[in-house]
């Protein structure tokens, strides 16, 4: 068989296992698409987004949406729809993602960015494997933003550049030099004036304008670096690459001024290995270890808990299983009726390494619109029907709706339309009673093996496993009924994000699982989004046991972990990475990832989380593709926001939105966490003093930053040359993401 046919067949079989139907392959050329697939029995109709017009280079304001129904006219959930640009692609028209998965209403949608020239665009949508069932949607690119000229053509840092054109967006637009974005200092739709940024690489640099969601075509300038005195206003910040610091800029300082400097490595590495780095401030006459800031909490670092240990093993096994699980015969789910009181046998892991299994029988005791709860028949004592109904309603109406609305639909491999919850003492027993004090316990988990039905021990469906109440310590350490419900609810929504992510990355698109830092970070975002449901329902002072509470009692199971994790991370940010996890992530690393993604959601809107999940891309490449920005730029501004958000005595509006958490008050949250835990630091970030005329040095890992305080200065100090390099003075490499954030605070 030709290679192209083999590739098509493997991809088709993967999709068919989701749909649960048989397939017939007929040999022929790849272009003939002679495959009897699930889509053969499906019909599509356009339900939204057709016939839109928008400026060239912009994203259409409404998604292109189709509805998929089966032969009986019922909407099809978790079916893959292919979107393809068939006209306009030569002008740059492109879909954000060419695959989409239907939700429970059978809806699939795609975002279209128009090309850079006016004209028509056509998009074809069809069920995977059934191109003859295609429907066509159209759009029109009207005259969009365009640059007609720039002056001067040869620029340097600090020069004012005039950009002439049409529909440029005025001061609300952004101008990008290479990958660096700046705001115009003045402008109209016809002309912008912008100050050329410091420290760009020499030679040709491209310039383009972002007006709304529309990019102009690029113009090329010649950039000539030169050292210039850089002046920052109070609470203004800049992030400069380490390689350009000493050669392109000096910091103009006065006696009363103070700055926070933030050396950082905005990359991901395979392992959290540190590099000894040095930040200089005008000389080498003194020394102080900023490593002390990075190591303050390391001596008290908590060993990986049982839940995190299991998570690490499951995610690693999923990564190994994913390639082998994509082949095999099409999956046809058995016709199993979900009726209250019915029994089902599950394969359940019995070790934290997830290598051994046992059979366990559950009885279906709750059945809702989206959730079915099985309880292990061996569990004693067990939930009452009333207790299960309360837990089921929480899962079914609050948590399911939140996670699917935020990240996208889960699969429906078994075609029962439900996510199954199996409450079993096998989860309790994953940690022995005498180990609970040291290792904690496992609350619950999702295992991607269950979405790969060709593998042994796969339960071939969407299943969340959780512990049962054990007030008498029959199976492991004791768990009261109320405590169990509280613990399980937070874990459920966390693991549901993993379930949805694994489906979209591996099963639906044939990619690899998401990288641990982004996968775990998004699951912690899921918990926070559940907290927001109850925060909105119970504004202060309602729903709180004490007047001092920031969050209502009902939000605590979902937000408390995020506050603890982020506090211990900020206490030692140099020692724990946003992007480079050890295993499935320590408490500090999880706090780092959640903080970054919370800031990212504030900047891009919470829809960014859905876009990060519904893709085959991973990690930093995923973030850059979905945000349209360089990761180094995002990471640099995030590092500034950690310090600049909610500065005591400073009105929030004095700090630009890019350097703040817009939906949270970070210092208020950290002060509350310190009070709850009995810690003395209301804000855990403690900048190390950088001696003027000297340096600080210490270890720094990929995906981390550290904070230094610079100033006040001696009268007549004048300009100060800053540097950021390895301890031995050698420069960082281009791929190491070394850059220095500089924030003026006085």
Image (cartoon, helix red, strand yellow):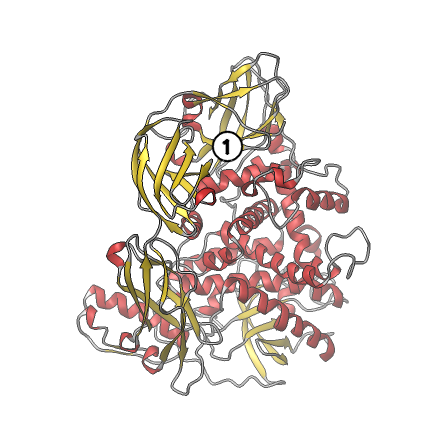
Instruction: Using the rendered view, name the quadrant where residue 478 is placed.
Output: bottom right
Can the viewer see residue 423?
A: no
State which quarter of the image contains the N terminus. Answer: bottom left
Up-down: is 592 above or below 444? above
- Left or right: 651 with respect to 420? right
Up-down: is 487 above or below 25? above
Return the residue nearer the eye: 313 or 627. Answer: 627
Residue drawn at 56 percent across, 57 percent down: 523
Residue furthest to the right: 546
Up-down: is 664 above or below 716? below
Give residue 8's position: percent from left, percent from top.
27, 68
Instruction: Using the rendered view, name the quadrant where residue 46 is placed.
Output: bottom left
Give residue 175's position: percent from left, percent from top.
41, 40
Residue drawn at 49 percent across, 60 percent down: 610
Can the viewer see residue 237?
A: yes
Residue on which disc 1 sits: 238
- Left or right: 667 with respect to 660? right
Instruction: Using the rendered view, name the quadrant where residue 148 is placed.
Output: top left
Give residue 735's position: percent from left, percent from top.
38, 36
Return the residue nearer the eye: 323 or 125. Answer: 125
Give residue 293's position: percent from left, percent from top.
62, 31
- Left or right: 719 with respect to 108? right
* Element type where label 1 sits in the image: strand
């Amino acid at each position: 068989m030709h290679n192209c046919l083999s590739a098509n067949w493997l991809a088709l079989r993967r999709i068919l296992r989701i749909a649960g139907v048989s397939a017939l392959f007929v040999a022929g050329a790849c272009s003939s698409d002679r495959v009897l697939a699930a889509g053969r029995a499906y019909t599509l109709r356009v339900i939204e987004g057709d016939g839109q017009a928008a400026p060239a280079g912009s994203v259409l304001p409404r998604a292109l949406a189709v509805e998929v129904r089966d032969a009986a006219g019922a909407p099809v959930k978790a079916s893959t729809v292919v979107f393809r640009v068939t006209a306009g692609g030569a002008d740059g028209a492109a879909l954000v993602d060419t695959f989409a998965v239907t939700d429970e209403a059978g809806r699939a949608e795609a975002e279209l960015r128009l090309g850079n020239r006016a004209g028509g665009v056509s998009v074809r949508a069809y069920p995977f494997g059934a191109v003859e069932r295609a429907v066509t949607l159209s759009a029109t690119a009207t005259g969009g933003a365009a640059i007609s000229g720039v002056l001067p053509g040869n620029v340097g840092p600090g020069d004012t550049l005039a950009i002439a054109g049409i529909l440029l967006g005025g001061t609300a637009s952004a101008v990008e030099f290479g990958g660096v974005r700046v705001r115009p200092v003045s402008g109209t739709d016809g002309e912008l004036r912008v100050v050329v940024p410091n420290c760009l690489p020499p030679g040709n640099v491209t310039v383009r304008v972002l007006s709304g969601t529309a990019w102009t075509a690029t113009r090329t300038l010649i950039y000539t670096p030169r050292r210039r005195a850089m002046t920052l206003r109070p609470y203004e910040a800049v992030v400069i690459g380490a390689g350009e610091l000493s050669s392109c800029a000096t910091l103009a300082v006065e006696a009363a001024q103070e700055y926070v400097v933030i050396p950082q490595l905005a990359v991901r590495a395979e392992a959290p290995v540190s590099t000894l780095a040095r930040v200089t401030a005008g000389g080498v006459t003194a020394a102080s270890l900023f490593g002390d800031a990075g190591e303050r909490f390391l001596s008290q670092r908590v060993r990986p808990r049982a839940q995190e240990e299991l998570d690490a093993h499951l995610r690693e096994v999923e990564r190994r299983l994913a390639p082998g699980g994509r082949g095999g015969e099409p999956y046809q789910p058995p016709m199993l009726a979900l009726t209250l009181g019915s029994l089902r046998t599950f394969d359940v892991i019995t070790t934290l390494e997830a290598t051994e299994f046992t059979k366990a029988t559950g009885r279906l005791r709750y059945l809702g619109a989206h959730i079915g709860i099985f309880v292990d028949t061996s569990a004693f004592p067990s939930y009452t029907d009333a207790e299960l109904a309360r837990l089921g309603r929480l899962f079914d109406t609050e948590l399911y709706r939140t996670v699917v609305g935020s990240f996208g639909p889960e699969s429906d491999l078994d075609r029962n339309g439900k996510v199954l919850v199996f409450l079993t003492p096998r989860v309790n027993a994953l940690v022995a009673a005498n180990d609970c004090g040291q290792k904690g316990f496992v609350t619950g988990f999702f295992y991607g093996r269950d979405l790969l039905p060709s593998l042994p021990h796969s339960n071939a469906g969407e299943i969340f496993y959780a512990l049962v109440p054990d007030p008498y310590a029959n199976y492991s350490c004791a768990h009261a009924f109320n405590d169990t419900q509280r613990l399980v609810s937070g874990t459920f929504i966390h693991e549901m994000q993993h379930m949805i992510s694994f489906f979209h990355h591996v099963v639906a698109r044939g990619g690899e699982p998401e990288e641990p830092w982004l996968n775990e970070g998004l699951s912690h975002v899921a918990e926070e989004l559940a907290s927001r449901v109850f925060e909105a329902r119970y504004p202060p002072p309602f729903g709180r046991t004490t007047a001092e509470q920031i969050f209502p009692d009902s939000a605590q199971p979902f937000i408390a972990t995020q506050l603890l994790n982020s506090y211990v991370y900020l206490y030692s940010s140099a020692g724990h990475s946003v992007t480079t996890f050890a295993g499935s992530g320590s408490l500090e690393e999880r706090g780092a990832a959640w903080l970054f993604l919370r800031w990212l959601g504030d900047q891009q809107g919470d829809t960014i989380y859905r876009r990060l999940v519904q893709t085959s891309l991973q990690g930093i490449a995923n973030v850059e593709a979905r945000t349209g920005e360089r990761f180094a730029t995002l990471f640099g501004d995030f590092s500034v926001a950690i310090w600049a958000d909610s500065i005591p005595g400073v009105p929030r509006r004095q700090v630009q939105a890019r350097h703040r958490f817009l939906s949270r008050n970070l210092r208020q949250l950290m002060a509350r966490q310190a009070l709850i835990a009995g810690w003395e630091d209301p804000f855990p970030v403690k900048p190390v003093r950088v001696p003027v005329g000297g340096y600080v040095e210490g270890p720094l890992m990929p995906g981390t930053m550290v904070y230094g305080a610079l100033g006040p200065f001696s009268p007549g100090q004048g300009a100060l040359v800053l540097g950021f390099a390895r301890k031995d003075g050698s420069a960082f490499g281009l791929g190491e993401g070394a850059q220095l954030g500089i924030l003026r605070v006085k």
